[in-house]
Amino acid sequence: MLTFAELGLPEPLVTTLTRRGMTAPFAIQTAALPDALAGRDVLGRAQTGSGKTLAFGLPLLARLAGRPVRSRRPLGLIVVPTRELAFQVVDALAPLGHSLGVAVTSVVGGAPFGKQVTALSRGAAVVVATPGRLEDHIRQGTASLDDVEIAVLDEADHLCDLGFLPAVRRLLDQVKPGGQRLLFSATLDTAVRSIVDAYLSNPVTHSTMPEGQPVVKTDHHVLVIHPRDKSAVTAEIASRSGRTMLFVRTQHGADRLATQLHRVGVGAGSLHGGKTQAQRNKALAAFKDGTVSVLVATDVAARGIHVDDVDLVVQIDVAADSKDYLHRAGRTARAGNAGTVVTLTSPQDERSVTNMVKRAGVDVRSTRVSPGSPELTDITGSAAVSGEPWIPPAESRSERADRPFRGARSARADRPVRSDRPMGSDRSVRPDRPVRSDRPVRSDRPVRSDRPVRDDRPVRSERPARSTSPTRTHSSRPESAPPVRDDRPRHERRASLQPRAGKPAFRGEVRSEGRRTRSA
């Protein structure tokens, strides 16, 4: 088996890879690195989790090492479909680029615009960007693609599925003519072929397996359950030991399922496009460090989310098509590890779901299960739920100090926590606080004699008293006269309050003595 050094990578890069535990390249890296290092256009196709990031990232860094970089004019561009994938690419390439003196930064939506401008101004050689935010920088003059020599499209098919094809074309039209183009994707459909024909010059195609074939070390199962047992089966699967990803169709469904799992004692986080970037980062970090063992996600997490040791993927809601099924399944069995993919369906939809999975090119087994059945435990490792609500761990003081400034009270990190005050008590009731006797009484304040007195203001006692009659109108009777009870039916009383013809009334308007007044 070849090594990274034998493939022609620079020595500092090989040393950093060895220090990070990567000594032997994967199949797609072995196939694509020689041609990419030689400067040829490369079209790579491999399943998710096969090492495509380093397949285009290593030659990109090696070829840009030692090149001078001007402010806001990067030399390398990597276009990705999602923010999570951009952060993953930066995390993988930034340490490697540091060994060669090549700065790598991200330009994505949902992140502070000013920080990205600062990174670009300092001369970032490689920019990992989503199309929308990169075009924003170009329009405002904070970034230019005129010096880009190497352009990479990662997950090109997903870029087209999300509607980014026009933006990708606009970006590729602005890069330096005659440069190198690298395109990597799990599948190559018609939209991707149009990009290949328009922007790649005599590309070399490298594919580690036939298109559409999934990860070989993955077991695929379709679990047929009664609709009324779906919640119970999901809770038992989520109670297993180990990292588990649950895929649903909608954002509301992700939050709702996470809340339901909390109630039965399962620590779960939710990840979808409706959350802010800070919330998405927090949920993903909690899943990576083991704070929660279950991540409920929409298809936004089916691309670009790399978490080690995810050995089970459960599709609570069936994927829209075979392509989405493969990308969901790609969250497990990454980097040569084994994994299991389970799809839940009802008896009525069993045939259609099984056919969809087979169109993805996998061998699937269909099994009828119920809550607590041995077959469910054998396939997924399910366990009984605890029944005790799951409570998120308390935030430490250091974590509170790291939060962004939100005002004067949040800035006082050294403020002691009052434990002697009962929850929900009145803040003004403080028996331990002494009463200040030196505070002057308001009545002791001197009266301002220089302020003029208004004589035209009517005396309060002279104002007419408000009527107490059921019709809520002003009365002209003397104040001493007792109120008269109106014994007419309700519909007759309401009819007497209608405005005169030809004059519109506002809400709450009543008629009394020929004047229009507002009811009390």
Image (tube, rainbow, N blue to C red):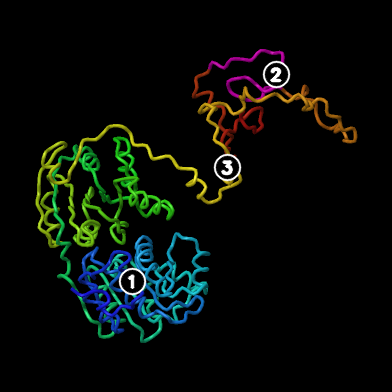
Find disc 1 in the rendering and name its residue.
Answer: 15
Mark nearer the N terminus (1 vs 3): 1
In space, the residues marked 2 and 3 are separated at their CA atoms by 68 Å
Within the image, what quadrant is residue 224 found in?
top left
Amino acid at pointer 1: Thr
* Residue indicated by mark 2: 477
Residue 248 vs residue 4, the one in the foreground = 4
Residue 313 within the segment the image draws in magenta: no
Is 335 placed above or below 426 here?
below
- Disc with the residue nearer the chain's start (2 vs 3): 3
Instruction: Tell us which disc is closer to us: 1 or 3.
Output: 1
Q: Is residue 219 above or below residue 434?
A: below
Residue at the extreme right of the image, as rendered: 450
Q: Nearer the viewer, mark 2 or mark 1?
A: 1
Q: Which residue is mark 3?
A: 414
Label 3 environment density (alpha carbons within 10 Å; few <14, some 14–19, many ≥20): few
Image quarter (top left, top right, bottom left or bottom right) of the N terminus: bottom left
Q: Residue at x 49, y 43 (%)?
A: 397
- Give, as a single range, the part of the protein colored magenta: 465-487
SS category of the residue bearing label 1: helix
* Kind of element beneath mark 3: loop
Residue located at (47% from left, 81% from top):
68
Q: Amino acid at mark 2?
A: Arg
Against 486, residue 292 (above or below) is below
Secondary structure mostly seen in the magenta stretch: loop
Where's residue 5, x and y in %?
Answer: 27, 77
Observer-nearest of 218 and 9: 9
